[in-house]
Amino acid sequence: MRRRLAGLLSEWRTGHLMVLLPLGLIVLISAIDISISPNIHLGPLLVVAPAITPSFAGTRLTVLIGVLALTAQAVIAVLHGGLFTPNHQAQLAALAVVTGVIVAYTRIHERHGRELTRVRTVSDAVQHVLMRPLPDHAGPLRIATRYLAAEDEAHVGGDLYAAVRTPHATRLLIGDVRGKGLPAVGDAAALLGAFRELAHRHDDPAELADALETSYRRHLAELADSGQDVQENFVTALVLDLPDDRSTARVADCGHPPPLLLTPTGAHPLPLRRTAPPLGMSALGPVDRRTEEFDFPPGATLLLHTDGVTEARDAADAFYPLAERAAALPADTPDVLLDALRRDLLDHVGGHLSDDAALIAVTRPR
């Protein structure tokens, strides 16, 4: 009994003043029915009270409102001809049946809600392990990230990012596994694990990308040995080295969209001249990856992104103009920029992305 009362109290706190709505309807409908002609029956409207309760409360409170509605219907019956007249018995039976159906639905809904909460908890844990949150500060840099998964209720997918600190630089990886959502998580996990291990062994971003290629191909071979079709598996990736003592960005591109450099004069993609094929495609021919170096002056921001951002479409099928919008959004800090960019992107697509999207903003303070 104590547990039940505690549950009712919890639901009352959750619903707050919303519970006054069904109670008020019960009182109002009963008062009107009692005060008007016995030939007019408003009692069946009492079903509205338990029907609206599940929108803000759980099973126990719904049962309580249903019992109160049945009690009110019984009071109306006693005052209008007697409780045992066929009409009033039919009204009471119908109200009881409908209330029972509503309570059953509420219990199923609550069970599904608990299952969904568990799934979200596991998804959050997987994302935290797979893609560890990037540090707010890495050496002299300030960093912010945002991840938007395409699949409903999934917090992880095929887009990936990671950061590793070396004694004199910050190394970043951003990538996009072919496919989206949970089926791509395995490839993303393999590449992220390889990056965290290899980033300390190679100073040159192109050499690091070559090592990631070798590791990813080994991962695909293991999948093929287990009978999976991996002929079309690949990952577009961008490897960056941001030295602490120089205002430069060293980049090796593997088929990934170039970062945007945000300065007071606007937002411009880095003019990459050498773009190698995505990781996992070296079997198609020789790959010649090279590192390119660009100015990354103090006060500027590098905006790394996946194609889930630039290929997002609105209702008119127009792509999201990332460079144009990023240049117009507030960029006081990386977090402010990405919060504004996320809202603007979701407004552009109507609230739901068709592909996973990842964003990283890196600022070199003045």
Image (cartoon, rainbow, N blue to C red):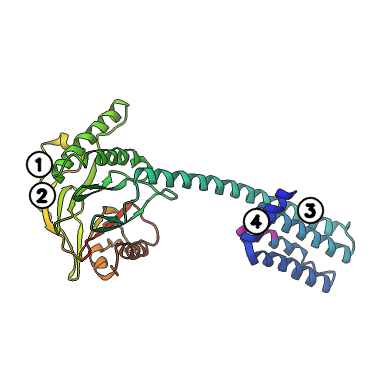
Decide whether residue 331 is among the magenta residues. no
Q: Give the residue type at disc 3.
A: Ala
Between the C-alphas of marks 2 and 3, the distance is: 77 Å
* Residue beneath the point at 40% across and 43% down: 126
Between the C-alphas of marks 4 and 3, the distance is: 30 Å
Q: What is the number of the mark on residue 274?
A: 2
Q: Give the residue type at disc 2.
A: Arg
Which residues are the magenta region? Answer: 50-58
* Residue beneath the point at 14% across and 41% down: 207
Q: Is residue 249 left or right of residue 132?
A: left
Which residue was labeled with disc 1?
288
Q: Nearer the viewer, residue 242 or 102?
A: 242
Q: Element at badge 4?
A: helix
Q: Element at badge 2?
A: loop
Q: Earlier in the sequence, mark 4 or mark 3?
A: 4
Image quadrant assignment for residue 262 = bottom left
Main SS of residues in magenta = helix
Q: Give the residue type at disc 1.
A: Asp
Residue 306: percent from the left, percent from the top?
A: 26, 53
Q: Is residue 306 left or right of residue 82?
A: left
Which residue was labeled with disc 3?
93
Please identify, in this view, whether the residue under mark 4 or under mark 3 is nearer the observer: 4
Q: Earlier in the sequence, mark 2 or mark 3?
A: 3
Q: Give the residue type at disc 4.
A: Ser
- In the rendered image, the residue lying farthest to the top is 225
Residue 312: percent from the left, percent from the top?
A: 30, 58
- Residue contact at pointers 2 and 1, CB within 8 angstroms: yes
Q: Earlier in the sequence, mark 4 or mark 1?
A: 4
Which residue was labeled with disc 4?
10
